Amino acid sequence: MIHVFNYKNTYYIYDSGSGSLHECDADTAAYLKAEYEGGPAPELTAEKKAEIAEDIKALKEAGLLFKEEVKVPPLKSGEVKALCLHICHDCNLRCRYCFADEGAYHAERQFMSERTAKKAIDFLIEHSGKRKILEADFFGGEPLMCLDTIKNVVAYARERGAAAGKKFLFTTTTNALLLDDDAIDFFNREMENVVLSLDGRKEVHDAIRKTKNGKGSFDLVIDKIKKFVRSRGDKSYYVRGTFTSKNLDFSNDVIFLAENGFDSISMEPVVTDIEDLAIKAEHLPRISAEYETLCDKYLQKHAEGEGFNFFHFNIDLDGGVCLQKKVSACGAGNEYFSVVPNGDIYPCHQFAGDKDFLMGNVYDGKLDGAIRAKFSGNSLFTREGCGDCFAKFICSGGCSANNYHFMGDVNVPYPVTCEMMKKRIECGMHVLARKKAEKS
């Protein structure tokens, strides 16, 4: 299928079968929309129509337009590749939008014991099959409240992994409140990636991300995050922000982060049903315009030699993961699981604590087959409505947890999220085209 769109009067054709992106003129865009998307018929001369038809024919013959989509089977295995370790169900912040109930996950606040964490590592190794690369993500709550446990578990996993012929990659997500020199040194030695939470401008961050005493946390973390990033070298990190209905001008927050020296940035729409923070359908026109504003600022920064990496504008149409991985959706509940402090296993961190999705415990080493089958059986092809969407091979059908929490079914995508995703993809395609044009 094709998708015809324009970005501020620059017109594009995206072919989902071949992954090709073509820039075209307004007449060609109007012609294609009328012929293939039910748009109004443009007033074109016979000569212009013949010219467009000839160009389309040449692209079709080259396999770059209207190429048939290949329906490959999802790449699902019974091998576990990653665990999210909820090393701490407690937090030193009280962020209003926190899906994890300010770190407690709607239960008692508790820490994972070292014994349970090591048992989770054993579980991962024992269920990893032939996989050689395994991943463990230290999550919370706030993981740095349990730094000593993390250190011991990393050392244990390195030793156990080496004995089993496995290599471990570690990541962690932190609010940076406890990010001192010791933690920085450890992260730089051991963590493949570190995600640091910072919502942008001080007034935006402090309005939501408050300490236990109700005060804003921006001044407590900004210098620590800057120090960490300066020390990080060429190792991966992301400064991750969240925007809500309170800061729909979030492009200013992204640029604020970039101008404070952060060159790997993500800014995610909030996932919440809190009335005054939630992103709703009525906000979509404003958000769409804001993504375009951000796209323009992003390209301007690159042109000025101050470029940065914005996660949602990273669109790879030339290579990237294989098609089988794209149609497989995420590995939650099948190849990826989350383990909470008492050792209970859930499909992912966003299902943690929901007893309907309790899959087992690391101490018995077994997984609920029915729940696992529910997740191993879903893919892009089971997602409702995805077959007719141009973005399907890029977004892979969305987040199973978000689908479930908003729509009641892992296979029914949440329309508000879909619309934001599609707009980000169009902006990412525009960025890709402009960068390629600069190189040619």
Image (cartoon, rainbow, N blue to C red):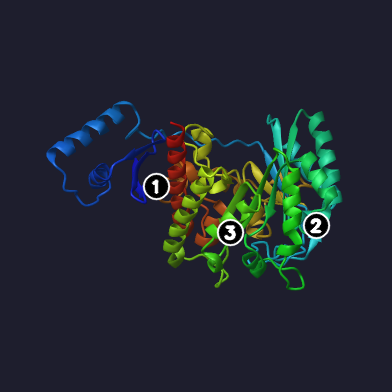
For label 2, the SS is loop
- Specify the quadrant that holds the N terminus: top left
Q: Which x, y percent locates residue 71?
A: 42, 35
Q: Amino acid under label 2? A: Leu
400 vs 104: above or below: above
Q: Nearer the viewer, residue 370 or 33?
A: 33
| Side (left or right) of 355 relative to 224 | left
- For badge 1, the amino acid type reads Cys
Give amino acid for label 3: Asp
Whole-number angstrom distance, CA of label 3 to CA of label 1: 30 Å
The reply to whether residue 128 is in sight is no
Q: Is residue 291 left or right of residue 204?
A: left
Q: How many marks?
A: 3
- The structure residue drawn at horizontal position 27% and vertical position 28%, both measured from the top left corner, is 58
41 vs 261, nearest the viewer: 261
Tag of residue 253? 3
Label 2, label 3: how far apart the Cα atoms are? 23 Å
**Residue located beneath label 1 in the image:** 389
Left or right: where does residue 198 sit relative to residue 294? right
**Disc 3 secondary structure class:** helix
Q: Position of residue 354 (x, y in %)?
A: 65, 60
Q: Residue at x 66, y 59 (%)?
A: 355
- In depth, the one of 64 and 204 nearer the eye is 204
Between discs 3 and 1, the one toward the N terminus: 3
Question: Which marked residue is nearer to the observer: mark 2 or mark 3?
Answer: 3
Which residue appears at 44% of the width and 40% of the height? 434
Identify the residue under disc 2: 178
Q: Gap in Å between the C-alphas at discs 1 and 2?
A: 43 Å
Q: Indicate the quadrant where residue 202 lies.
A: bottom right
Which badge, 1 or 2, comes first in the chain's sequence? 2
Q: Check disc 1: other Cα within 10 Å, few if <14, some if 14-19, many if 20+.
A: some
